[in-house]
Image: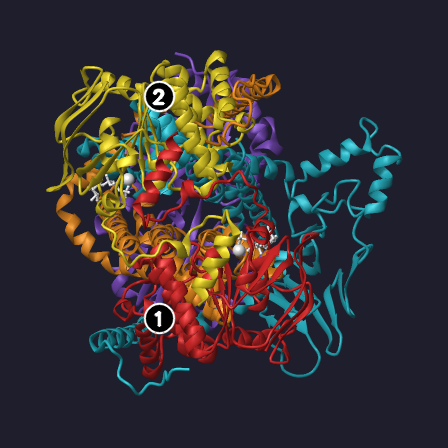
Chain colours: A purple, B yellow, C red, D cyan, E orange
Amino acid sequence: QEITQFNLGIMGGENAQDRMNSNECYRAAIEAELGVPVKVFTPADYDGVIQGLLGGSLDMAWLGASGYAKIFLTDPEAVEPVLTKQNMDGSTGYYAIGFARADSGIATIEDARGKSFAFAEPNSTSGYLVPGAELQEIVGPLADFFSDVRFSGGHEQSIVGVANGDFDAGVAWADGLGDWEDGYNSGAFRKAADAGLVDMNDITEIWRSKLIPEGPMVVRKALPQEVRDKIIQLTADLHETDRDCAYGVAHGEAMDFVPITHDAYEGIVAARKLEEASS
Amino acid sequence: MLEVRNVTRIFGNRPAVDNISFTIDRPAFVGIIGRSGAGKSTFLRMMNRLTDASAGRILVEGREILGLTGAARRAWQSQCAMIFQQFNLVPRMDVASNVLHGLLNRRSTLATMFNLWPQTDILRALQILDRLGIAEQAPKRAEALSGGQQQRVAIARALMQDPKIILADEPIASLDPMNAQIVMDTLRRINLEDGRMVIANLHTLDTARRYCDRVIGMRDGRIVFDGTPEQLSTGVARDIYGADESFNEAATSTAIPADSAADAAYAARMLA
Amino acid sequence: MLEVRNVTRIFGNRPAVDNISFTIDRPAFVGIIGRSGAGKSTFLRMMNRLTDASAGRILVEGREILGLTGAARRAWQSQCAMIFQQFNLVPRMDVASNVLHGLLNRRSTLATMFNLWPQTDILRALQILDRLGIAEQAPKRAEALSGGQQQRVAIARALMQDPKIILADEPIASLDPMNAQIVMDTLRRINLEDGRMVIANLHTLDTARRYCDRVIGMRDGRIVFDGTPEQLSTGVARDIYGADESFNEAATSTAIPADSAADAAYAARMLA
Amino acid sequence: MTGMTASPPPLFPPVADTVIARFRRRRMLSFAVPLAILAYLLYAAMAFDVAGLAARAKMDNAKVLLADFWSHKTHVTRDNRSGRLTVAIEGEAKGLYPQGRLPGWVTVAGEVTTIDLGGGHVVTYDAAGARYAVPDYGIIDIRPQGDRLVLTTPEGALPDWINASDRRVSVTTAGGRFAYTRSKVETFRYAAGWPAFFFTPDSPFFGKSWTQLAGLALWGERLDPSRPNVAAMASGFLNNAMWQHGAVFWAMFETILMAFLGTFGAAILALPLGFMAARNMMPFGALRFGLRRVFDFIRGVDGLIWTIVLARAFGPGPMTGALAMLLTDTGSFGKMFSEALENIDEKQVEGVRSTGADSLQRARFGVIPQVMPVLLSQVLYFLESNTRSATVIGAIVGGGIGLMLTQAIQTQKDWEDVAWYIVLIVLMVMAMDSLSGWLRRKLIRGS
Amino acid sequence: MADIAHGTNPARPLPGDTSAAYLALVRRRRLYGGIILLVFALAMISGFRLAEDRNAGGFLNGLPLVLDFPSEVLSEAWDKRANLPGLILRHLPSLVETLNIAAVSTLLGGMAAMVLALLSTRGLARWPRLTGLFRRLMDGARAIPEIVIALVLIYILGGGPVPAAVAIAIHTAGALGKLFSEVAENADLKPVEGLQSVGASWMQRMWLGVVPQVAPNWLSYALLRFEINVRASAILGFVGAGGIGYDLKIAMQWGQGRYDLVVAIFLLLFLTIVAIDRLSDHARNRLVKG
Ligand SMILES: Nc1ncnc2c1ncn2[C@@H]1O[C@H](COP(=O)(O)OP(=O)(O)OP(=O)(O)O)[C@@H](O)[C@H]1O
Ligand SMILES: Nc1ncnc2c1ncn2[C@@H]1O[C@H](COP(=O)(O)OP(=O)(O)OP(=O)(O)O)[C@@H](O)[C@H]1O
Ligand SMILES: [Mg+2]
Ligand SMILES: [Mg+2]
């Protein structure tokens, strides 16, 4: 069985064109390897990529963990996670970090009882799903614990909203490496701080989730085995063969792309199911 | 040649045309007069099969035409041209195309859909337009023409159909006096030169008098007068129109006086 | 009372009204005749200040009115009523409202926009309508009326303005003979009974002859005749209209004959 | 003059009564309608909490936004661990000034970097830490000591524009922004304009004036020996890494393409359907009714929802967007076309019918010529408004200028890009507007 | 009888140049018509192929899958159909908010459009020299996508209905203004002139002379706009501007598991739009006829 073209979907926070550009070398590499035209798609909406994978018009994509869980729950036979990113410290994940205004007197999640709380958006892994599920375990039903639970629309909006006092506390993602006052090495805090949207002195960390696995690179299960092998090999070796390109694909400094399986995302899938049941 | 037998048309429960009959045996110029609502239009529309009759028969050269349907009806329509008061041209198309529409029934649907007319047809349309004195208007859009010119285009379309009978429904009611005269003259000439029968609804007596061989007067759907123009006395006319004596015609005549002595006298009388 | 001095209006580079002057010293019924494009409408519109003049002066009781602007111009317009060929009523509003519009300049904008007409105004409007014989139409929409009735509504609006001068631009051109007579009679009565000056553009000679105290003939923007109706001979008329002998008036007259003997003879002549 | 005073009773008392009663009713209506509207707006203001809005409004955000629309900031960053100094527009790698071609207001002398923020504001980085000289205030001095930062300021309480903890100090002044943490020290200099709009700092053409550029283009020596300066400029401009003009122009084209395909495809589909749904053309009432409801349905489902539905089948891309638009517009056109067909002037049809034309010919000559201008003008009107919708749909299907725009807005920092995209979109829509207006006039008057 | 229709020489030969010129015109017209048709067809075909080429999935491959997503949604919603009434009830308040956004923006935008339209219509304008300015103003208001205004306003004012209402109102003012002015352009000037001749002020001329004429058409456009605005405000909810669109977006993005909610909200929205459509059709018919 032959393929005539290969479509790659990418999602993430950066500008579409930046994503296109930073993946151009990768695209060319796949094209050379497979010998068929390769196209890259960068929809603004999670759903674009997810639907593409489900419908079979995309062959491979980098997804958030929650996006993968959504696909898995819709059709377990659609895609399979194969690789993920390994950070410089060897970890393969990041954190959801709860925070509040430094002068609000909230220092732990317990202090936030009866206050308003902002998640990012319902489809976000670190902005809602994981912290929502974990917080629920700690403090019970969130609607009872907090006075008001809102979706701000995104991590940046949560940060700005909390800093401005629109919400008493919120949650956003960070890699947890480096210093708080810099907004950690990467993540939403870092971006907001760099952009001058927030002064890290004004906010303080009140809670941190368990490690959230990095999103997987998934390939469609229906692809010929030979194609999948080639692609996985090529990507896994990228840090060794072309470091600059790997930098772009990995979205910054990373140690390597390492194999991963569905098991790593069982937790996320469970969280999603929990959320679904509670709705 | 034309025989109308007990033709009736009922709208709702009011008869618009009420059991009329008459016979015409040569290609005459027939005028139908009568005031608004008398049923003149309805009768012509029945002849052209635009409106169905409720009862009666119309025989043209022995053939009953009220019963025709489908292609036969369309074929009859193509032999019996209709000229409307409002011209009913396609205003956005050019004059020559409008004239060519007279051939729609005779040419294949497919070719006409793409406006693909044979050159001979186009030339004939131009010739007809030339005969009516408006050949130079051929490339213009119909809507760009004056009323009189548009009515002549409508006549050209009728001639293009090469009809036996031309029906004209108040052909000059939308026209000013000058254009009205041109149009009536044209119709009369076609009637005489080509020997085509013309049946025209007219709303003015003088016109009927001047152009017709035969005048039929209708009122409330019935024929109340049928005769030569000479027989059309004032009494008959008042009957047809239901006008009364108090109405003074002179005050609003649009004509230009032919004789100044009369004028002066008139003026003196009026201003007395 | 009214003095027109060297008034000119140029459109593009063609003068529509070309240096005309005349004086009227009593509230007369003045008719302006002339064929289409002679500049009749343009002159009346300048008087009402709907169109600006290019040069010249118009003095009404000593006051120059061509130079007025803004509120002064609107105040002048409210004293000088205009009646249009197409009536220019607001068709979707009722007759009484249309008549009340004559007061727009005298009542506050805000009040008129909220329909706050004082009861006395409404009663006066009804009285005027009654005087013109159409009081029972008052609640109807203007568009529902016949042409003659609409024109009388327009006259009522003009009377509501209580104007010194009534300008009428071909007030009967859109009307049928019957209605035309009613409207002209009304205007004449207002002229005589109220002593308001009426200046009317007319496109027919007989009308001018019958109703006017004074007739001004225009051609190509110039005054080519100015005198009493009696002085209006056929020669003068042909001059004004630029008509030639070939045009036959009788063919399209819309009148109903008064005398049947004449008819018969005429018909015989025509069909010869 | 006859007396027209109000005193004598009118001759038609019943008429007078009706008229006066009518005026009374109308008077009430003239007040009731505006009052009702006002009351509703008041209710809505309450429901929308407009009063609370004033409190929630963040005018600083507006200021940031407006400032960001037309100005830029340059980051001067020193990594406190490695000592590496970088100067970059908006702090982005793409806006990095190459070493040795730093802007004039940054001077580097060994370990000491001096940044002149203008107006007497001067920031100095040195081995000991950093100092910020603020005019009329004094010197803010920061020195790291072990794990903490030691802040020395002139006498008195800390002003609110200095935000200090022992881990981070930030200063915001009219001259710029300054932040010190253990890992790095960063100064932000704000200035008007979009400096990298034409060329990024790594381009040899960066920062040249128009005359210099013209000189280079026309007779200057080749800066890149392999190609003429004009070609280098063109490629530098189109491939500008920050603004990506080439990609933006392509995106605009893709947007217009989607609108074009969607609109005209829908028009072609809707024409026969419109005939079938017009009362005076379609004898079968049931079919007509069914078609109308289908139109209602596909119109009622918004284009954005169709986009998601179609994305499953066709995946992301411009065709999906065009098809979504095509689908929605078929609904709109079907309804509008059939209504236009129901409003035709029967005279023309009758004229054609009287010659014996069959139904196709009647449609062709009696109907099409008179509805064509109406249909065309509707289609062209949609073309214009679809250009606008295509920007939004594009964001979802991953194509066109809309994708760039929404992402620039979502990341909340590239506001100058947002401003530029908005300008481009407005220009594009206006251009389509005048194009469709021109075509409309041309096609309706001409032919 | 004087035959002025045909001059003196009825047997005049056909002027050759007239017919030659007309035949040439016919040929030219056929040629141009053919070329235009060809160019248009080529543009459509190549445009479509380009778009297909840049799409992830092809047209023919995708066609059989078109119903996949709807059937997935519907089958789940069918399984959980018992939930639907409850879900619909629960989202009624959001629907009211969406309707309010649409109504307010249509009202405000419509009123602005009335003024702008009258000011920018030839023959009616208060300041004829400024018509161009007002037109550009409308063009601008129309050209900026609502979503842009909304996103910027959300950044400043925070989420909620006001940014959406303002954004839609601005757009409505531009869009309706253009339509209104097209209607006003075709308004009969005779009544206006009649009012002018009695010395009426501009406001009076417009209010009494123009507005009654154009009101049915304006209202009909405004009602159409209202329907469009209901949809637009729902869509703006997608970006966090409140109303039922926000709920729909969240449910839709969540995907499987909440398709019952998607269907419930969608039904609500769709029924509303159909209801408005019927209502406005009814109102329009009554206005035009009555
Ligand atoms: N389609 C129709 N439906 C109902 N009634 C009709 C229809 N057509 C005509 N009528 C009625 O039939 C009567 C005769 O109408 P017709 O148009 O034939 O009169 P007419 O003599 O041509 O008058 P006019 O001079 O106004 O054209 C009128 O009362 C008219 O209202
Ligand atoms: N607004 C205008 N712009 C340009 N030319 C005009 C305008 N109004 C009138 N004219 C021209 O001025 C000339 C006189 O027109 P006017 O309307 O005054 O004639 P009239 O005597 O009233 O004719 P009619 O009987 O047709 O109303 C005509 O040639 C006309 O074309
Ligand atoms: Mg008739
Ligand atoms: Mg005139």
Q: Name the residue under label 2.
A: A222
In this rendering, position of residue D411 left or right of residue A215? right
x and y, in percent, of residue D220 in the image: 88, 36
**Disc marking residue E255:** none
Q: Quadrant of residue D329?
A: top left
Q: In which quarter of the image is the C terminus of chain C?
A: top left
Establish if B53 lies above or below C91. above
Q: In which quarter of the image is ligand 3?
A: top left
Q: Where is residue D114 in the image (x, y as percent from the top left)?
A: 79, 61
Label 2: state its secondary structure.
loop
Are dots 1 and 2 in contact, CB under 8 Å?
no
Disc 2: residue Cβ within 8 A of ligand 1's nearest atom: no
Which residue sits at x=43%, y=63%?
Answer: B270
Q: Callout 1: residue from which chain?
A: C
What residue would you read off at disc 1?
A: C97
Q: How crowded is mark 2: few (under 14 residues within 10 Å), some or many (20 or more)?
A: few
Q: Pinpoint residue B272: horizontal percent, then vertical percent.
A: 44, 68
Identify whether B190 is placed above or below E120: above
The image quadrant where one finds the N terminus of chain C is bottom right
* E263 with respect to A227 (left or right): left
- Looking at the rendered structure, the kind of residue marked 1 is Ser
Q: Say above or below: B27 vs A52.
A: above
Is residue D274 or residue E202 the one in the foreground? E202
User: In the depicted view, which residue is nearer to us: B224 or A138?
Assistant: B224
| For residue D188, above or below residue D361 | below
Q: Would residue D69 be visible to someone looking at this image? A: yes
Seen at 56% across and 33% down, the residue is A23
Location of residue C115 by image quarter: bottom left
